[in-house]
Amino acid sequence: MEILKIEHLSKVFGKGDTAVKALDDVSFSVNKGEFVAIVGPSGSGKSTLLHLLGGVDRPTSGKVFVDSTDMYSLNETQLAIFRRRQIGLIYQFYNLLPILTVEENMQLPLLLDEHKVDQKLFDDLVKTLDLQNRLHHLPNQLSGGQQQRVSIGRALMNQPAIILADEPTGNLDSKNSSEIIDLLKMFNKTYHQTLIMITHDERIALQADRIIAIEDGRIARDEVIRP
Ligand code: ADP
Ligand code: MG
């Protein structure tokens, strides 16, 4: 089943002489439960692509369908709600709110939409992510690996259709990096959570089901390595 469909997606930053075509006519589809690694040189358009898949920014042209919804046909308010419900974003530097506790950071997206917190889901996630003894800590009282586990928990609290991760281990040592990848793979394999991850690390890319290489804003290679 197709969960994501991208059609002729382009993104131009700036105007005139200084315009940069960050993404140039990119099309592909992703099936539910797939783990896709996005690779490519720095500046090739990977983060721009992920932001457009996540509804963080609007494309210059082209369409993104998430679970059949034409995401950019939504107005700003609808898009913000849709994005919080359907997309889980994970960043290299965690993007946690420094003045909120672990528990508050994890529950924030739900509370913004006035949804009730699913206490069982929350408790299960906290246990799986080994954060039981950290719920009332602030982000700066945690290690990098713990902070990234909080950001994974926050992403999963909405039970989103898709998890998008931009270099989620880029700031972590190899032990924490393996733990984070193993967690994301566990959610992907056990719960069929669709996962699209940008990585510079070839060993991580080779653990995916499929590798898409971006060069100069275009798809240079799209290869299924685990059918
Ligand atoms: P990657 O993640 O592959 O390193 P990016 O998607 O961040 O690449 O960037 C692709 C290109 O778009 C680069 O040339 C970058 O400078 C440019 N770019 C990205 N975001 C912006 C922005 N907000 N404004 C202007 N140019 C941008
Ligand atoms: Mg990037």
Image (tube, rainbow, N blue to C red):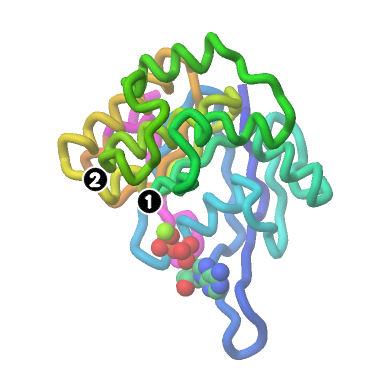
Residue 125 visible in the shown view = yes
Coordinates of residue 14 in the picture (x, y in percent): 63, 79
Say which amino acid is labelled 1: Phe
Three-letter amino acid code at the position of disc 2: Leu
Q: Is residue 220 magenta?
A: yes
Residue 100: percent from left, percent from top: 49, 40
Relative depth, front residue between 109 and 41: 109
Q: Earlier in the sequence, mark 2 or mark 1?
A: 1
Q: Is residue 133 above or below residue 93?
A: above
| 79 relative position to 45: left or right | right
**Residue 27, x across and y down, in percent:** 60, 49
Q: Main secondary structure of the magenta part?
A: strand
For this view, does 213 lie left or right of residue 63? left
Which residue is found at the position 72% from the left and 44% from the top? 80
List the residue tagged with mark 1: 93
Residue 32 belongs to magenta span: no
User: Looking at the image, can residue 215 be seen?
Assistant: no
Q: Residue at x 80, y 46 (%)?
A: 77
Quarter of the image with the N terminus in it: top right
Depth check: 109 or 174 in front? 109
Check disc 1: other Cα within 10 Å, few if <14, some if 14-19, many if 20+.
Answer: some
Tell me the quadrant of ligand 2: bottom left
Residue at 52 percent of width and 32 percent of height: 104
Q: Is residue 151 left or right of residue 145?
A: right
Query: Residue 11 falls in which quadrant of the image?
Result: bottom right
Question: Magenta region: which residues?
Answer: 207-227
Whether the residues at callouts 2 and 1 have beta carbons within 8 Å, the answer is no
- Depth order, front residue of 182/226: 182
Residue 158 image point, x, y percent: 60, 26
Residue receiving disc 2: 172
